[in-house]
Amino acid sequence: MARLRIGLTGGIASGKSTVADLLAECGAVIIDSDLLAREVVEPGTDGLAGIVSRFGDQVIAGGRLDRAALGRIVFADPQARHDLEAIIHPAVRRRAAELEAAAGPDAVVVQMIPLLVETGQQNAFDAVIVVDVPERVQRDRLIARNGLSGQEADARIAAQATREQRLAAATVVIDNSTDLADLEQRVRQVYRELTGEPGC
């Protein structure tokens, strides 16, 4: 089997990481854009220098990026968010390409990209998996998980593509509004369908 490239996305707090973990158990190589986005802004990187140049020292604490401070700026200002993405996204894509090149020629490579639809990457993959939950579920999970206010949760949801836009880009939809047992079963089924492999 030739390398299979899968894009994995979904709204904030939809359960993408859980689905990625389950796909990894099936044998997929996971490339997590969120982890890479942290890596490319570590102290000493060009990414961090670019952020300081644009946003100033107010987003630095103890020599490292103060994500909370930066978040307050970019989620309140679409232009600031655009500027941040212009710094981070190219660096993340370069690093993801390096990791993918290091995977075997017959690997199943899953790139987990929260903003896959927003950045127009849906046609760059052999398949696109969208993890889907209703917005009210996203909102409840965000408030519980991140300690956000309802208003902050709504702002983060609104900053992403709509549910309809994500579903329109999907090759496969995984509903994650039930329980973990259902989710595990669905992920294994999707992996078998996409790879043609009987395992998992």
Image (cartoon, grey):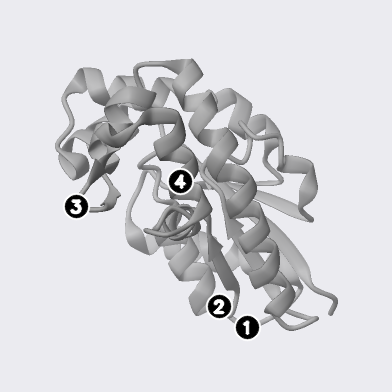
First in residue order: circle 3 vs circle 1 = 3
Q: Earlier in the sequence, mark 2 or mark 1?
A: 2
Viewer-nearest residue: 62 or 101: 62
> The N terminus is located in which quarter?
bottom right
> From mark 1 to mark 4, how far is it between C-alphas?
45 Å
Q: Contact, CB < 8 Å: mark 2 with mark 1?
A: yes
As measured in the structure, the alpha-carbon distance from the residue carrying label 2 to the one carrying label 4 is: 38 Å
Q: Quadrant of residue 35?
A: bottom left
**Whole-number angstrom distance, CA of label 2 to CA of label 1:** 8 Å
* Cα–Cα gap, marks 4 and 3: 15 Å
Of circles 2 and 4, the one toward us is 4
User: What residue would you read off at disc 4?
Assistant: 49
On the question of residue 132 being in view, the answer is no
- Which residue type does callout 2 highlight? Cys
Q: Residue at x 50, y 42 (%)?
A: 10
Residue under the image location 68 percent in, 81 percent down: 198
Secondary structure, mark 2, is loop
First reached walking from the N terminus: tag 2 or tag 4:
2
Q: Are marks 2 and 4 in contact (CB under 8 Å)?
A: no
Q: Are marks 3 and 2 in contact (CB under 8 Å)?
A: no
For this view, does 128 lie left or right of residue 138?
right
